[in-house]
Amino acid sequence: MVKETDGLYSTKPEGAFYIFPRIEYRDAWKNDKEFVIDLLKTKHILMVHGSGFGQYGEWHFRSVLLADRETLEEAFIRVGEFIKKRVRG
């Protein structure tokens, strides 16, 4: 899911029920908090900004992986659309 989403980078989660992708296109948003608020307002997808977990979380967001696979795939398709629209204008 995340590996196929342009503009995000993440390692494969091992034993965790969440993922912590890094936002690659930093010029499109002021910070990770603005990214997740904009994502919620435009795509109605709730994520947690990574900077809330300390300085190493800056430019990341946290997504819980407890939904079914179909729902998660749809969510990350919408995240990819959101990033493309913002980056390309």
Image (cartoon, helix red, strand yellow):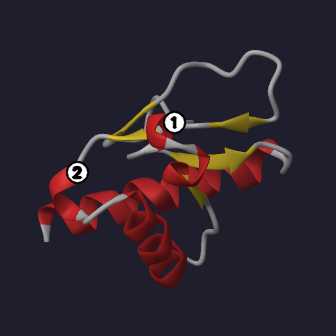
Q: Which residue is mark 2?
A: 26
Q: Residue furthest top?
A: 14
Number of numbered discs overlaid on the protein picture:
2
Q: What's the mark number on residue 32?
A: none
Q: Secondary structure at mark 2?
A: helix
Amino acid carrying label 1: it is Val
Q: Which residue is mark 1?
A: 2
Q: Residue at x 61, y 69 (%)?
A: 45
Q: Nearer the viewer, residue 16 or 74?
A: 16
Quadrant placement of the N terminus: top right
- Label 2 crowd bin: few (<14), some (14–19), many (20+), radius 10 Å: some
Can you tell which of label 2 and label 1 is closer to the viewer? 2
Residue 20, picture quadrant? top right
Q: Residue at x 28, y 41 (%)?
A: 24
The correct choice, above or below, for 11 with respect to 19 in the image is above
Q: Is residue 87 left or right of residue 55?
A: left
| Mark sitting earlier along the chain (2/1) | 1
Residue 54, picture quadrant? top right
Q: Is residue 30 left or right of residue 45?
A: left
Q: Residue at x 59, y 78 (%)?
A: 44
Quadrant placement of the C terminus: bottom left
Q: Nearer the viewer, residue 76 or 64?
A: 64
Q: Where residue 8 sits: x, y (%)?
A: 39, 39
The correct choice, above or below, for 67 with respect to 46 in the image is above
Amino acid carrying label 2: it is Arg
Q: Are marks 2 and 1 in contact (CB under 8 Å)?
A: no
Q: Where residue 16 sits: x, y (%)?
A: 80, 27
Q: Secondary structure at mark 1?
A: loop
